[in-house]
Image (spheres, helix red, strand yellow):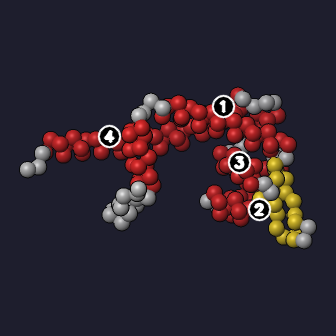
Amino acid sequence: MIDHSEEENKDALIKTLLEVVQDIQTKLLSEDDEEKQWLIKNSPSPVIANLVKEMTVMMLYVLDAIGKLEPVNGITISKKFGFSKGSISKITRKMVDKQIIQFEYLPDNKKEILFRTTSLGKEIYQLHLAMHRQIDSSVNHYLKRYNESELQFLVNALREALHTSWLYSGLNEESID
């Protein structure tokens, strides 16, 4: 026998969960402003604060990639982080103009350009790392409120969601262990 009230409760919870996921997406998109304000407020100098004000989120992502991988070429950044080569080219030109990064050529290859952070770029990169350490600490503190089985459920649910196609129902629904 089918318990209709249980099915209705489940449907209501699924609807609520979808609404919460949508709200989380909206919040994450709006946090770009919050993060930028944090970076400006915590800048070590007015010069850095002004550069951060002028930077886009994509520029910060590219700077982060260069800071982690330097010296690095645009193709590697593009492949590793999923940005188009055209976007990388446009963003790196702007960053070179602002003296956040510099480019260099390999001695035996004048065609391939490698990117490195300048001293200003290193300061912004370190500031960006500090912001992410703050975020990681806050997330860790937040998640400590859950017990081990609740955290395991979240890990499993999110991992399965990551590997599920929402367009092609049933294709990727096998459980991830």
**Does 84 sit left or right of 139 as displayed?**
right
Q: Of discs 3 and 4, which sits in the foreground?
A: 3
Question: Would you name the residue on which mark 1 appears?
Answer: 38
Q: Is residue 28 above or below residue 93?
A: above
Q: In which quadrant of the rendered view does residue 153 lie?
A: top left
Question: Would you name the residue on which mark 3 appears?
Answer: 64
Amino acid type at circle 2 is Asn
Judge the density around disc 4: few (<14), some (14-19), many (≥20) Cα neighbours within 10 Å: few
Q: Are marks 1 and 2 in contact (CB under 8 Å)?
A: no
| Of pointers 1 and 3, the one earlier in the residue sequence | 1
| Of pointers 1 and 4, the one earlier in the residue sequence | 4
Question: Would you name the residue on which mark 4 appears?
Answer: 16
Amino acid type at circle 3 is Asp
Amino acid type at circle 4 is Thr
Viewer-proximal residue among 112 and 67: 67
User: Is residue 101 visible in the rendered structure shown here?
Assistant: yes
